[in-house]
């Protein structure tokens, strides 16, 4: 009687627990040299209170699209091992748009710390 060995390949796809997903809304404060965005976010119901912290992003192109001062909405993914990252990042308001709504327009350029080299108040009707 011979012994037959049967090998079975088991795919781990689908066997790993899916990360939990939370809705995040906040303001980008900084884009770090390590490829993370620093976000000051609102409360995340069922997960954490409002705070400021760094987030990795799944799509590296996001780092070229977001800007300090802009508002974003994203899916915060939290793995069972504690790793976390942002997916589906959407810009909800850009900094120039927010400033123009408040009657302030930047001129010059944005510095690495998120500040501008100059500011001016938008002229109101009848002013020069």
Image: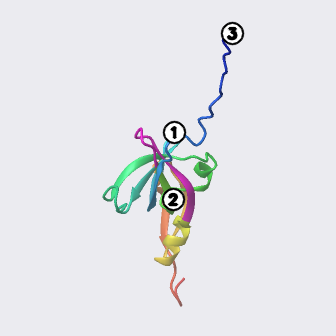
Q: Nearer the viewer, mark 3 or mark 2?
A: 3
How far apart marks 2 and 1 lie (CA) works out to 21 Å
Q: Nearer the viewer, mark 2 or mark 1?
A: 2
Q: Which of the two discs, 2 and 1, labels the residue nearer the N terminus? A: 1
Q: Quadrant of the C terminus?
A: bottom right
**Dot 1: few (<14), some (14–19), or many (≥20) neighbours within 10 Å?**
few
- Residue name at image x 59 percent, y 35 percent: 12
- Of all residues shown, which one is farthest toward the top? 1
**Dot 3: few (<14), some (14–19), or many (≥20) neighbours within 10 Å?**
few
Q: Is residue 111 left or right of residue 45?
A: right
- Of all residues shown, which one is farthest toward the bottom? 126
Q: Which residue is mark 3?
A: 2
How far apart marks 3 and 1 lie (CA) works out to 62 Å
Magenta segment: 78-91
**Residue 85: image x %, image y %?**
49, 47
| Residue nearest the viewer, comparing 42 with 64 | 42
Q: Which of the two discs, 3 and 1, labels the residue nearer the N terminus? A: 3
Q: Which residue is mark 2?
A: 74
Q: Quadrant of residue 50?
A: bottom left
How far apart marks 3 and 2 lie (CA) works out to 59 Å
Q: Which of the two discs, 3 and 2, labels the residue nearer the N terminus? A: 3
- Residue name at image x 56 percent, y 57 percent: 89
Q: Which residue is mark 1?
A: 33
Decide whether the magenta segment is chiefly helix, strand or loop. Answer: strand
**Residue 49: image x %, image y %?**
30, 58
Secondary element under disc 2, as helix, strand or loop, is strand
Secondary element under disc 1, as helix, strand or loop, is loop
**Residue 11: image x %, image y %?**
63, 34
């Amino acid at each position: 009687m011979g012994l037959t060995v049967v090998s079975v390949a088991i795919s781990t796809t689908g066997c790993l627990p899916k990360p939990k997903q939370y809705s995040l809304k906040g303001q980008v404060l900084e884009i770090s040299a390590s490829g993370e965005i620093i976000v000051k976010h609102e409360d995340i119901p069922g997960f954490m209170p409002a705070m400021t912290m760094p987030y990795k992003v799944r799509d590296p192109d996001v780092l070229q699209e977001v800007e300090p001062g802009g508002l974003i909405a994203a899916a915060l993914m939290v793995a069972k091992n504690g790793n976390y990252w942002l997916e589906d990042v959407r810009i909800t308001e850009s900094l120039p748009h927010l400033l123009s709504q408040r009657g302030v327009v930047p001129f010059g350029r944005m510095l690495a710390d998120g500040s501008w080299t100059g500011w001016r108040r938008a002229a109101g009707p009848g002013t020069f």
